[in-house]
Amino acid sequence: MDIVNAVYYDHFLNPRNSGYVEGANGIGKWGDPGCGDFIVVSIRIEKDVIEDIKFMSNGCSASIASTSLMTELAKGKSVEEALRITGEMIDEAIGGLPDDRKHCSILGEKALKAAINDYLSDGS
């Protein structure tokens, strides 16, 4: 099944929040050895709010698009709200990924949660 929706293509061709956050206070890494996709999420949290978030990806178009969308869902949210973001929410917001690409939305969720946990483990 081909992915043919405007939201998906827009996030793949024009990824939001790509790169690395200067002064990041949380870093999360997550990969899928089965397909080789790997995501790094950097965040800066101030007063319990994700003020900045960026990602780097070595992966397919679905992992880039869904992680880009995840950063938009998380930016400006409290830590508690961001921890509630799921792969299903990302998948729904992007318009639905084919079954063989559903795992890509989970990569973004896991990398985000790893970054938040990194922030929280520093005693912040």
Image (cartoon, rainbow, N blue to C red):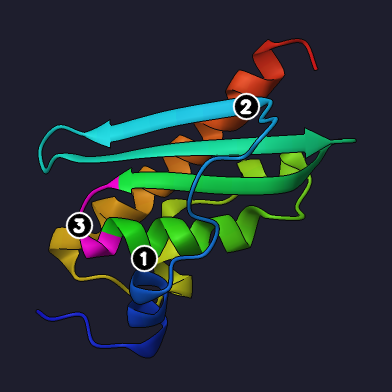
Q: Secondary structure at mark 2?
A: strand
Q: Residue at x 75, y 52 (%)?
A: 77
Residue 62 point in image, percent of width and height: 26, 63
Q: Residue at x 55, y 47 (%)?
A: 54
Screen quadrant of the N terminus: bottom left
Q: Where residue 115 is drawn, which disc sits there?
A: none
Q: Which residues are magenta?
A: 58-62
Question: In the picture shown, does residue 36 fall above or below 74?
Answer: above
Nearer to us in this view, 102 or 37: 37
Given contact means CB atoms under 8 Å apart, are the residues at marks 1 and 3 in contact? no
Q: Give the residue type at disc 2.
A: Gly
Q: Quadrant of residue 32?
A: top left
* Residue beneath disc 1: 65
Pointer 1 or 2: first along the chain: 2
Q: Residue at x 49, y 29 (%)?
A: 28
Q: How many marks?
A: 3
Residue 35 point in image, percent of width and height: 11, 43
Whole-Å distance between the Cαs marked 1 and 3? Answer: 9 Å
Specify whether 124 is left or right of 36.
right
Q: Secondary structure at mark 1?
A: helix
In this rendering, does residue 88 appear at all?
no
Specify whether 47 is left or right of 50.
right
* Residue beneath disc 2: 26
Nearer to us in this view, 95 or 122: 122
Few, some or many C-alpha atoms within 10 Å of disc 2 (few <14, some 14-19, many ≥20)? many
Specify whether 96 is left or right of 43.
left
* Residue beneath disc 3: 60
Whole-Å distance between the Cαs marked 3 and 2? Answer: 24 Å
Pointer 1 or 3: first along the chain: 3
Q: Give the residue type at disc 3.
A: Cys
Residue 41 point in image, percent of width and height: 49, 39
Q: Quadrant of residue 73?
A: bottom right
